[in-house]
């Protein structure tokens, strides 16, 4: 019964996440340097337990290529892809999932950080920039 409640609650939160109001947005510019860091170290905004991760893998089989690599100092899961090569390249590049194709998003709605040395950057506007 508990599993069923977790399952329904995950679906409910997934649907709710599509209705978060958008306020400030940040543009991302640059180009990929093919370092592979984003395939070896990634976060999920809505997966907090191993059970939730298993449910996500059940709902979206393409996520089965990912595994929990560890936790950061704040206790958030760090995920990695089983497929990325030692050189940081994608062996299924032409058939990589949409989330990999779309990374990094051209525009995000929180002041996110990219990996150190990543060829992209988040352009953070100040309050004065918005006034202009
Ligand atoms: S971390 Fe940035 S530069 Fe490195 S592979 Fe990912 S997108 Fe490309
Ligand atoms: S499928 Fe390819 S691009 Fe996506 S995380 Fe794995 S190695 Fe990286």
Image: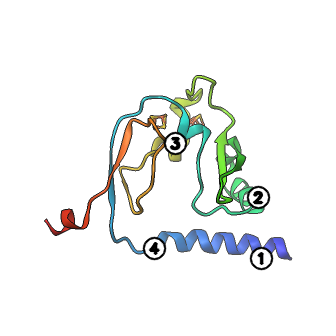
Q: Residue at position x 33%, y 62% from top?
A: 25
Residue placed under numbered mark 2 in the picture: 50
Q: Quadrant of ligand 2?
A: top right
Q: Which residue is mark 4?
A: 20
Which of the two marks, 4 or 1, is nearer to us in this view? 4
Q: Quadrant of the N terminus?
A: bottom right
User: Is label 3's Cβ within 8 Å of ligand 2?
Assistant: yes
Rendered location of residue 17, percent (x, y): 52, 70
Q: Residue furthest right?
A: 1
Q: CA distance from mark 3 to mark 1?
A: 30 Å
Identify the residue at horizontal 33%, vertical 67% (top origin): 24
Question: Which residue is disc 1 drawn over?
Answer: 5
The numbered mark, 3 or 2, whose residue comes first in the sequence reads 2
The quarter holding residue 5 reads bottom right
Q: Nearer the viewer, mark 2 or mark 1?
A: 2
Toward the left, the furthest residue is: 132
- Between the C-alphas of marks 4 and 1, the distance is 23 Å
- Badge 2 local density, few (<14 within 10 Å), some, or many (20+)? few
Q: Nearer the viewer, residue 109 or 5?
A: 109
Where in the figure is residue 92, as x and y percent of width and height?
Answer: 58, 30
Whichever of callouts 4 and 3 sits on the residue coming sooner in the sequence is: 4
Whole-percent x, y for residue 34 in the image: 47, 28
């Amino acid at each position: 019964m508990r599993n069923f409640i977790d399952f329904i609650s995950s679906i409910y939160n997934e649907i709710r996440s599509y209705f978060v109001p958008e306020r400030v947005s940040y543009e991302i510019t640059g180009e990929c340097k093919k370092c592979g860091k984003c395939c070896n170290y990634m976060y999920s905004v809505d997966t907090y337990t191993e059970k939730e991760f298993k449910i996500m893998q059940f709902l979206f089989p393409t996520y089965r290529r990912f595994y929990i690599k560890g936790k950061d100092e704040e206790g958030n899961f760090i995920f990695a892809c089983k497929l990325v090569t030692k050189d940081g390249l994608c062996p299924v590049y032409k058939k990589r999932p949409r989330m990999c194709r779309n990374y990094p998003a051209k525009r995000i709605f929180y002041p996110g950080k990219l990996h150190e040395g990543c060829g992209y950057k988040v352009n953070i506007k100040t309050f004065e920039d918005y006034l202009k």
